[in-house]
Amino acid sequence: MKIAYLMRARPDLDNMSADGIESIQMQVGDDGLYSEQDLARLTDVDAFVIGMEPVNEQILAAAPSLKIVQRLGVGYETLDLEACARRNIPACNVEGVNKEAVAEHNMMFILALAKHLVHANALTQASDWVSARRLTGQAFEIFDKTLGIIGFGNTGSELARRAAAFGMKLMVNDIRDANRPLADEFGARWTDKDAIYGEADIIAICTDLNDETRRMVDADAFARMQPHALFLCCARGGIVDEHALAHALKSGRIAGAAIDVFEKEPIRPDNPLLGLENCLLTSHVAGVARDTMARCWEWAHENVRAVVERGERPRWIRNGL
C-alpha cells in the first residue's frame, strides 16, 4: 500500500506512518498548487492522508489509482468534495477523534480567563506580589455562571459535560436535534443564538465552518453580549469576524476572549487580536495533544486499510458516496 502524505514538513513522518506502508510526502505551494515534480510521483498512490493541504482537481487528476482521501482531523474544508465524488473516491475525516481535547482546551480557556491566570503568572514571576493579589478583585468563580454553547455536536456536548461538573448553568444551540436528550441530561436549556448572546456569561463556539456559519459571530452578535461576557472559539477560523471581536475587546463591549483558530493561518503579524491584554491566543492546537494525535493517526490509517487492503466501506465519508 502506498500513501501520499499531504502536509507541511514532518521530519517525524516515518515514526507516525504505519508498518507496511510505502510513503511519499508532499507540500502545496503558496499558490495553492503542487509542483509537477511532486505530481509525477502519484501515479501508483492508493491513498492521500492529509493535514490541512488542499485536495483539488490538480492533484486528483495526477493520482489515477487513488482509492480514498483521508483527513487527519475533524475539519475537511480543504477537500474538494465534489471533485472526489466525481471520481467515486470517498473523502473522509476522523469524526470525534479530538472532542475530549478540544473540550478540555475550552475549559482551560474558561478557567484562565476567569482567574486572570496569564496576567497573575506574569506579575508573580516578576515578584510583584501585591499587584498579583489585586487581580483577585477581578477574578470570579465559574460555579453558577451561565455557559452558552453554539454547536452541540461532539465537541459541544463534551464541553457541556465538563462545565456541568463545575456547576455551570448551560444554554445550547444547534441546527440538529440529535443531541437534545443529552442536553436534557445536563440540564441545559435548548435555545437560539440570540438568547445565548444576550444572556450567557461565557459563550463558546463549537460549530462547523460552512456557508451559514462563516463570519456568523459579527459586530451585531458582539453588540448583543453583556459587558462582562467572555467569548471562546476553538472551532474553525472564519466563523468569527476578527476585526469585530478586536473592536469589542478594545472598546469594553465584552470583557475578554480566548481564540485558538484564525481566518488566516499561520496567524499573520497584522491580525487585529495580537497584543490585546484581554485576549488569550493559541495556535490551532486545541485538538492536537500528544495522545489525541496518536489516536488520530491510528484511526486514519485503519480507515485507509479498510478500503485499500480489505475492500470495505470506510467510516466518516463526507462527500455523499
Image (tube, helix red, strand yellow):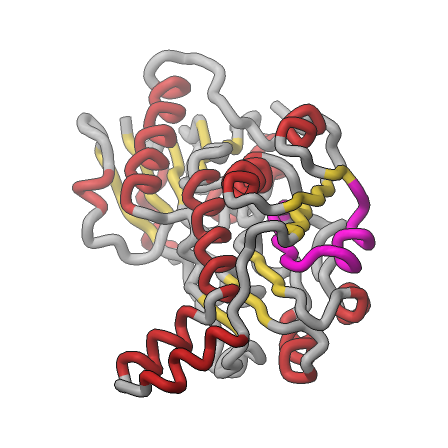
Near-viewer residue (195 or 45): 195
Q: Is residue 123 left or right of residue 89?
A: left
* Quarter occupied by residue 263: bottom right
Estimate the x, y position of residue 136 in percent, counting from the top left: 47, 73
Q: Is residue 154 left or right of residue 266?
A: right
- Asked whether 286 falls inside the magenta stretch, the response is no
For the point 59% across and 41% down, which residue is it? 156
For the point 40% across and 86% down, which residue is it? 131
Estimate the x, y position of residue 133 in percent, counting from the top left: 40, 78
Q: Is residue 312 above or below residue 133?
A: above
Near-viewer residue (258 or 63): 258
Estimate the x, y position of residue 130 in percent, counting from the top left: 37, 86
For the point 54% across and 49% down, which residue is it? 78
Determine if residue 61 is in view.
no
Estimate the x, y position of residue 70 in percent, counting from the top left: 44, 35
* Quarter occupied by residue 304: top left
**Quarter of the N terminus within the rendering:** top left
Near-viewer residue (222 or 319): 222
**Quarter of the C terminus within the rendering:** top right
Near-viewer residue (171 or 56): 171
Q: Is residue 238 above or below residue 125?
A: above
Q: Which residues are magenta?
A: 191-208
For the point 59% across and 32% down, which residue is it? 318
Q: Is residue 28 left or right of residue 230?
A: left
Q: Is residue 7 left or right of residue 319?
A: left
